[in-house]
Image (spheres, rainbow, N blue to C red):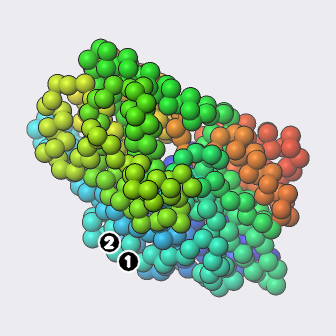
Amino acid sequence: MSVEIEFIGAAQTVTGSRHLVRTSRATVLLDCGLYQGRRAESRRRNLDLGLDPAALDAVVLSHAHIDHSGALPLLCKQGYAGSIYATPATRDLCAVMLQDAALIQAADARYLNRAIERDHVAAEPIEPLYTSADATRAVEQFVTISYHRRQAIAPGIWLSFLDAGHVLGSAICVLDIEDAGQTKRLVFSGDLGRNGLPILRDPEIPEGANALMLEGTYGDRLHPAAGEMDDKLAAVVQRTAARGGRVIIPSFALERAQQLILSLKKLRSTGRVPKLPVYVDSPLAVNITQVFRLHPECNDAELAGLLASGDSPFEFDGLRFVSTADESRAIGGRNEPCIIIAASGMCEAGRVLHHLKASVEDPKNSVVIVGFQAQHTLGRRLVERRPWLRIFGVERRLQAEVTVLNGFSAHADRADLLRFALAVRDCGALTATALVHGEPAPLSALRGALQLEGFGDVRVPATNETWRL
């Protein structure tokens, strides 16, 4: 049997997820995400996808986050004309998220090109990686498969999805591969969710796996309980309001923004935070919140009950969804204590950059980090509390309070990952595991923990390394 996997992206890093599965009969790409990091490096790595689009028989998408889906328009622009397989919710989310990515690229290019011209900087003009038309073309190539349905996607390869519990529509990808008269089951976790979080169901356990590709973002740490995160969020809001400042929360528009809205609604209803105006300054978050209502198959019992009762978890007095750029600028012009939730989650693009530009030099304000921040992103520099931050090419002194609340993460922690891997092994014939989507230290720690549990062949592949099954 000849099956090999090439790890093109998200190998010893958490961004740019791309994995090629090759047999003697077919080539399938798992995920096609954008690399996020230093601007010049990101552009170089995203323009060169590291594969031949024309050689692909199929693309499988685990979920809609941009580090997993964001390069799909570029792939199609460069010649891929086949099917992109995803869950129905992931397709609907990508319809708005890929358009948003294209619009953000265009807006950032305009802003930076004006700065280059104004300041007479010796630099080449910035071109967006792809356009809105490219994003539309990619969405037209989607083919949706509901959870637990088995579908032939390439010669000798069948696909089924299980719920990963990470974000709306996220999937564990199960590939049954037949080659040279033998069959192997490869399981790709995508990004794995946590047990017991609100909004989404818990991750499912695939049966019969021979090989496992497991994410390891938080392979070296445990998350605090969700209730503890609500307490810490309440405390930072109270402190900042007492100073007369603003709370800026860079947030992924998918899942994290909705989780924050639900937490703030609960905190306000119990009087644990002052009733400050809350702005969700992201057209994408507005659209995504509407998509949640279209997919009850992904909701946990609590969210389903709230929606059925008419008590929307995503609405409360004082909450405003901001769509237009004029409305966004108006928020900046009001000198009032408030809470601003804005994308992007790693502070690399979008409206949050404008709010940070206006806020980080004032000690009255707070920046609350609620998700993983990849190396070389502005979000990571905030986590590290660097004294100077470069925002839109200008150095700004960090004087605002920075609070990190990783307990809001939708990623499984070390204990969740170990439980999942053990369960997969217990109900299958697992002989080999590869750890992806993590930085070296967490992946090494998770590898050691798995080996202590008796896992034999556990690998931490490097970029462009090939794994033969």
Q: Which residue is mark 1?
A: 140
Residue drawn at x 32%, y 71% is 136
Q: Residue furthest right?
A: 454
Quadrant placement of the N terminus: bottom right
Q: Residues within 10 Å of mark 2 (few under 14, many from 20)?
A: some
Residue drawn at x 28%, y 40% is 317
**Where 79 falls versus 118 (above or below)?**
below
Front-lying residue, 378 or 163: 163
User: Three-letter amino acid code at disc 1?
Assistant: Glu
Helix, strand or loop at mark 2: helix
- Indicate left or right for 238 with 296 as reference: left
Q: Which residue is mark 2?
A: 136
Count every numbered label the image shows and give the total: 2
Q: Is residue 363 visible?
A: no
Q: Residue furthest front?
A: 309
Helix, strand or loop at mark 1: helix
**Residue 103 - label:** none
Q: Position of residue 205 (x, y in %)?
A: 72, 60
- Indicate left or right for 193 with 350 as reference: right
User: Three-letter amino acid code at disc 2?
Assistant: Thr
Residue drawn at x 63%, y 77% is 149
**Where 112 falls versus 370 (above or below)?**
below
**Where 75 falls versus 157 (above or below)?**
above
- Indicate left or right for 156 with 448 as reference: left
- Indicate left or right for 37 with 322 as reference: right
Residue drawn at x 56%, y 74% is 146
